């Protein structure tokens, strides 16, 4: 039997290892590039799939039109009863009502918005609006319910809204729901009566 040249065997194995490592290096780099591309694609997909912020709305009717206000500013919905008239008040002021021990002015702004106004304030419902405390009552024909929409589904009203309602309109949905801006409603000087009956 011939003697085995172990030095030669070890040299051949070393050369084979170097060759394999050299052949694998580009593959490892390519695999890393593929993995990085996949990671970027997954990250982008997560961003695209992120749900839009939701806006919860209280939907109500004035005449044949549907309006809505964010539920964050609708503190209560109450049935119209015991409305006290205010002598000499403008037509937009339907009177005052008591709510949880406080006296609130009750407004019917439909005349301001060009919407047919109810003849009497003895029917319908009242949206009690405010930030942290009741500020005023808004007379509506009927509360339809509560819905939620994605904020990016709210589109600007055509032409910015129509006439007198323009300052109040925050946007319109594809279903024709007119969403009002609660801050604009509460800040409207036409709805100011005796500093809203709250002492300073």
Image (cartoon, rainbow, N blue to C red):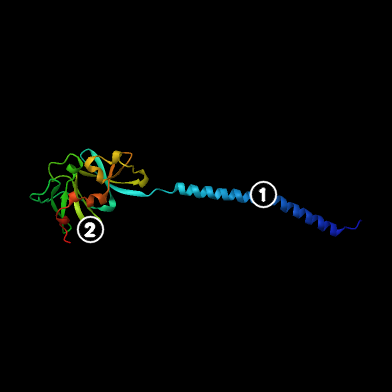
Q: For mark 2, does the 10 Å Cα neighbourhood hold few (<14), some (14 to 19), or many (20 or more) residues? A: few
Residue sitting at 28 percent across and 53 percent down?
72
Query: In which quadrant of the rendered image does the N terminus lie?
Result: bottom right
- Give neighbour class at mark 1: few <14, some 14-19, many 20+ (Cα, 10 Å): few
Q: Residue 54, percent across and down? A: 35, 49
**Image quadrant occupied by the C terminus:** bottom left
Residue 147 at x, y = what percent?
31, 46
Residue 59 visible, this orientation:
no
The percent position of residue 176, horizontal first and vertical second, equals 30, 39
Tell me the tag on residue 74: none
Residue sitting farthest toward the left: 87
The residue lying toward the viewer, choosing from 165 and 46, is 165
Q: Which mark is residue 133?
A: 2
| Among the two numbered marks 2 and 1 on one chain, the one whose residue lies closer to the N terminus | 1
**Residue 153: which quarter of the image?**
top left
The picture places residue 56, in percent across and down from the top left corner, at 31, 49
Q: Mark 1 points at which residue?
A: 27
Q: Find the residue positioned furthest to the right.
A: 1
Pick whichever, 166 or 92, lies toward us.
Answer: 166
User: Cα distance, mark 2 to mark 1?
Assistant: 67 Å
Q: What secondary structure is found at the residue carrying circle 2?
A: loop
Q: How many marks?
A: 2
The reply to whether residue 7 is visible in this rendering is: yes
The residue that appears at 14% across and 48% down in the rendered structure is 93
């Amino acid at each position: 039997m011939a003697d085995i040249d172990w030095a030669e065997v070890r040299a051949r194995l070393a050369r084979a290892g170097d060759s394999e490592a050299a052949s694998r290096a580009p593959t490892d780099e390519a695999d890393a590039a593929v993995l990085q591309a996949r990671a970027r694609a997954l990250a982008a997909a997560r961003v695209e799939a992120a749900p839009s912020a939701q806006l919860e709305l209280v939907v109500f009717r004035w005449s044949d039109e549907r309006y809505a206000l964010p539920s964050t500013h609708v503190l209560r919905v109450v049935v119209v009863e015991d409305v006290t008239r205010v002598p000499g008040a403008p037509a937009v002021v339907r009177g005052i009502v008591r709510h949880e021990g406080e006296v609130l002015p009750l407004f019917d702004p439909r005349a301001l918005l060009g919407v047919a106004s109810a003849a009497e304030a003895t029917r319908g419902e009242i949206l009690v609006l405010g930030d942290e405390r009741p500020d005023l009552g808004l007379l509506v024909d009927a509360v339809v319910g509560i819905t939620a929409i994605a904020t990016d589904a709210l589109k600007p009203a055509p032409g910015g809204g129509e006439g007198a309602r323009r300052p109040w309109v925050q946007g319109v949905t594809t279903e024709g729901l007119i969403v009002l801006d609660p801050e604009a409603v509460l800040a409207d000087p036409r709805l100011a009566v005796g500093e809203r009956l709250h002492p300073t």
